[in-house]
Image (spheres, rainbow, N blue to C red):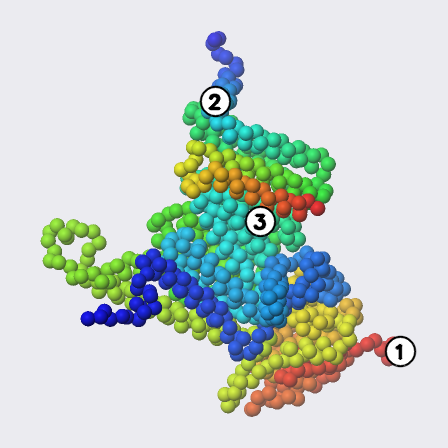
Amino acid sequence: SSGINAEWPLRPGVDVVSRLYNEYNTKTPQKLKIIDAYLGYIMITGVIQFVYCCLVGTFPFNSFLSGFISTVASFVLGVCLRIQSNPQNTAVFKDITVERAFADFIFAHCVLHLVVLNFIG
Amino acid sequence: MAKQKSFLDVIGISSLSQAKKETLIQMSVLAIACILSFCVRLFSVLRFESVIHEFDPYFNYRTTKHLVENGYYDFHNWFDDRAWYPLGRIIGGTIYPGLMVTAATVYNALNFFNITVNIRNVCVFLAPLFSSFTVIVVFLLTKEVKSVGAGLVAAAMISIVPGYISRSVAGSYDNEGIAIFCMLLTYYLWVKSAKTGSVCWSLMCALAYFYMVSSWGGYVFLINLIPLHVLTLMITGRFSHRTYVAYCITYSVGTILSMQIPFVGFAPVETSEHMAALGVFGLCQIYAFVQYLRTNMTPANFNILFRGVVTAALVAAGIGFGIASFFGKIAPWTGRFYSLLDPSYAKNNIPIIASVSEHQPTTWASFYFDLHLLVFMFPVGLYYCFRDLTDANIFVILYSVTSIYFAGVMVRLMLVLAPIMCIMSGIGISSTLNTYMKNVDKDEPVVQTAKSKKKAADYPIKSEIATVMVCIVAIFLTTFVFHCTWVTSEAYSSPSIVLAARGHDGNRIIFDDFRESYNWLKHNTPEDAKIMSWWDYGYQITAMANRTILVDNNTWNNTHISRVGQAMASPEEHSYKIMKELDVDYVLVIFGGLSGYSSDDINKFLWMIRIGGSTPEGAHIKENDYYSGTGEYKVDKDASSAMLNSLMYKMCYYRFGGVMTENGKPTGYDRVRNQEIGNKNFELDVLEEAYTSEHWIVRIYKVKDLDNRGSK
């Protein structure tokens, strides 16, 4: 390696991110990776809606809000499911089994989409 | 020798296990508290009749009748053309429908089972019913925060505390009657979800929040308190996965639910009052993500990533918020809520908000009057909360501190303070009794050796001190009960629409002037007659007389109210022009000079002058013109000419100059102002007297038509 490396600020950053990615790949169980993929998809739909709104304008505002809040709430519910299914967290969530977490997830989605349907106009 | 059977053996109680006995005691205490809270609110029904009180409840009653008769879609889309003539009012979009929908549901449920209760009775008794539910919710909330014992004391206190009774007596059919129940239910579910971290409880909390938003504008308090709690947990390092789950679900689902109420509309994403919740939501995501990274990386790597990302994010957020506020995308705090932060704002800028008596700051006397013992037990409870800090305790501490501030700014918000005072006092009293009760039956201490003197918490005459302390607490609680019952009976049980007084021989005289005159209006005026009165009486006139009015208690249009104020305060000729412009047929004033009723229009006249003069068309109305030469507010011969010639003066005192009101005083003696009126014999040019009620409290005048052939 040369003396003063002009890329010094970047090199540790790139190192950190690649190490993070490797650890994530090896250490995370399959179930959580599926949930993470779902979360990534939700985030993409949210970003698309927001960009569309910025381009086209906010009319009708209630439709935009209901679609956008639907993505935000689905994302949050997915994260909560991930937290509650993570075997590392069983000490934090006493009495909440993985099955109960999934059942709550479904119930919450029913209520959320009922409201979204009502608000979308 | 047969064993003697005691009474308890006979009814089978002594054979129960300890746990079952405790449950039995809990259930009976709660049941008695619920029944008590319902019964203590019935004073006015027993003394007068089952009638709706005050002013605002009449509007709620009228809308509930409309909902029950015409169904929900009609109610949701209702445009009322009988109020705020000629503007009308969009009722469907400017009310909180929770109260009406609740009453209509109870009414429909009862009628479904063929229990035919009148809608008026459902409305009158709804608030006491919900106060029983509040007792149960307060018990559950305090049980979550502290213990069952504290819960029972708090439940017993909330059933009779005057601060809550004042807005939930039978007949007071107002939003606060159910809003307090909804608020405490939301808080209970929030504490439960923050403790368990379960998605199901958080969803229940969001649904309860929706019910709260539908019932009262004070929901803004909740949507700021819950994020404040989460922020405090973050700062004190108690933010866990449970809190994340609880807050994120409550906020996201709760926000979209709250936007379903037309009156709230898009406010949760546009106004400053809701920005704190949005900010904390974003902060939660960042915090949780940071925690996730921290657990999966070495500290050194983490720090590098952390510093870079956080600086970028903070700068972006700051710029974004600044731009949004500058371009007006985020509305600033509205007048009513801004005046809570800056109490002098309303007085200087918006006279209508300042004139409402409920919006005045609270006096110390009010605190003691409404809360009695709780004022002293509250710091005790606060101390015990601080001693064992948990997530739930932090929440009640924040709730109590913020509501003490708001209750000090506005009298009306004493209502929000009363439940938390009960909870804190319940914790205080229960902890105090716990400390001392176990010492009451101690045996005499044995002779002290050197060793035993080192034992902690051992002091002489332990049992006697404990007995004295328990007796003191018992005396406190007994005086509390007497005070609450007395206050409810004397101060908070008057229907306002019916007055009563004691005659010389002790018999009761009823002043039913209001209903008498509204019924006269209903039967003796054409259907499309327009009535001008001050805005206080608008709701009652539309509900009972069923006539079109100009201004009512909603006070949403300051300019229109100011026009009415100008009509009342100007001389007859000028007023006639204004009244013809507004198509007024009848004018209604309230006059207390004969009966001694002090909340009449002459006492409110100064506010009419101030509001009338606050718009450009009222520039000729200056407050100082209406004071006497010495700067006092007078109606006798010292009164200014502007005062003596105003339409209000003439309407109130027409023909009053010849009436003998009290022995030993001249005729035309005003019993409220304690002055003999200045201008006694005058005629009215533009009005003619239509009706004066039995005790001269309500006076109705008909506006004369234009001359047939022009002025002479």
Whether residue B699 is situated above or below residue B103 in the rendered picture: below
What mark, if any, has residue B709 been given in the picture?
A: 1
Mark 1, other Cα within 10 Å: few <14 / some 14–19 / many ≥20: few
Q: Residue at x 65, y 65 (%)?
A: B64
On whether disc 2 and disc 1 are found on a single subunit, the reply is: no
- Pick the residue in front: B551 or B671: B551
Residue A46 located left or right of residue A8: right
Q: Earlier in the sequence, mark 3 or mark 1?
A: 3
The quadrant in which residue B5 appears is bottom left
Q: Residue at x 73, y 66 (%)?
A: B82
Residues at discs 3 and 1 in contact (Cβ within 8 Å) = no
Residue identifier under label 2: A26
Whether residue B172 is situated above or below residue B393 in the rendered picture: below
Residue identifier under label 3: B273
| Distance from Cα at disc 2 to Cα at disc 3 | 45 Å
Q: Residue at x 11, y 58 (%)?
A: B447
Tell me the kind of residue under disc 3. Answer: Glu
Whether residue A79 is situated above or below residue B522 in the rendered picture: above
Residue B551 located left or right of residue B708: left
Q: How many marks?
A: 3
